[in-house]
Structure formats: structure tokens, C-alpha cells
Image (cartoon, rainbow, N blue to C red):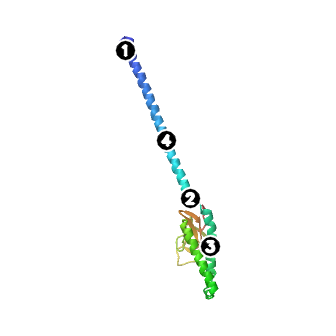
Amino acid sequence: MSESTAENLPEENSAEAARIRELEAQLAEVKNEALRHLAEAENTRKRGAKEREDTAKYAVSGFAREMLEVADNLHRAIAAVKPEMLDNPGVKALFTGVEATDRQLQSALERAGIKKIEPLGQKFDPNLHRVMIEVDAPDKEPGTVVQVMQPGYMIHDRLLREAMVAIAKGGTSGSVDKKI
């Protein structure tokens, strides 16, 4: 081997070693980028699946709000019947039919994931209730719901309609405009 070839060997080896290090660094960068893209694709897939699930879960929200008005009217009709009116067989039959319709509607709402909020006696929650009035209720803690004027409803884990309530004086009042 000539002296010039021997002198070039370390230079060639160091140049090759540098090129190998450069290629290894590029390979690591490409691997990291590929992993990031895979993670991003997986997150996009999960986000899409969640959005599809939520769309299916809450698709009936608009229709359900309209059906709540029907439920309210059925409740008003039932409440309007005085006990002495039930002595009339025609009124009694009509009343029984309205009650059966109300039960069937409530059952259908529950099957769709819609549940009535039962706040009577509970502490006022601005996320679920709208205070309509404050009343004197010395036997109740201030801020306790003492009357439900219109029931509220949840659809799965979201508020569909807040309950309109009366609370004992001294509690918090206000409303929440958080709707689906």
C-alpha cells in the first residue's frame, strides 16, 4: 500500500462514518415523522368515531324538545281535571286515556335517552335549573328548590331543557342559557 493510500483511508472512513451518521439521523427523523403521522391518523379516526357517536346519540334533540311541549300539555291536561269531574264516566275515560298517553310518551322519551330532572327538594343548580321566583319557605334552606313549574330534561349526559323552579329565599337566582 502506498503512503498516500494509507493516509486517505482514515479520511475515507471518517467521511463514510459521517455519511452513515447523517443517514442514521435522517432515518430516525423519518421514523419519528412516520410515528407522528400514525398517531395523528389514529387521533383523527378516534375523533371521527366520537363525532359519529355523538351525532347518533344526540340526533333526536330537536325533535325531543318539541315532544317535551306535548308532554307539558299532557301534564297540564291531567292537572286541570278536578277529582269531582271524574264522577262523569266520559271524563273519567278521557282522563284515563290522557294518563296512558302521558306514560307512553315518557317511556318513549326514556328509551331515547331522555330523562326528566327531578329537582324538588334539591339545592339550586344553575347548570340544570332556571329560577323563576323566590318564595318564603322558612322550613327550607335558602336556595332549595321548593316548586317545579316546568320539568327539565337531560338527553344522555347533556341538558336538553332546564327545569323552571321556585327556590327558597336567600338562595342564588339566575338562569343558564346553555343548550344543546
First along the sequence among labels 2 and 1: 1
Position of residue 86 in the picture relative to residue 34 (left or right): right
Residue topped by disc 4 = 36
Label 4 to label 3: alpha-carbon separation:
53 Å
Question: Label 4's element?
Answer: helix
Image position of 143 with respect to 177: above or below: below
Please tell me in which quadrant of the rendered image residue 164 appears: bottom right
Foreground mark, 2 or 1, reads: 2
Mark nearer the N terminus (4 vs 3): 4
Which picture quadrant has residue 160? bottom right
Q: Identify residue type, mark 4.
A: Arg
Q: Kindly identify which residue carries mark 2.
A: 56
Q: CA distance from mark 3 to mark 1?
A: 98 Å
In the foreground, 142 or 81:
81
Disc 3 and disc 2: Cα gap in Å?
26 Å
Is residue 31 visible in the rendered image? The answer is yes
Looking at the image, is 178 positioned above or below residue 145?
above
Q: In this figure, which residue is indicated by the disc labeled 3?
A: 72
Mark 3 or mark 2: whose residue is earlier in sequence: 2
Q: Earlier in the sequence, mark 2 or mark 4?
A: 4
Q: Name the one closer to the observer, 172 or 120.
A: 120
The quadrant in which the C terminus is found is bottom right
Where does the image place residue 5, in percent across and percent down from the top left? 39, 13
- The residue carrying mark 1 is 6
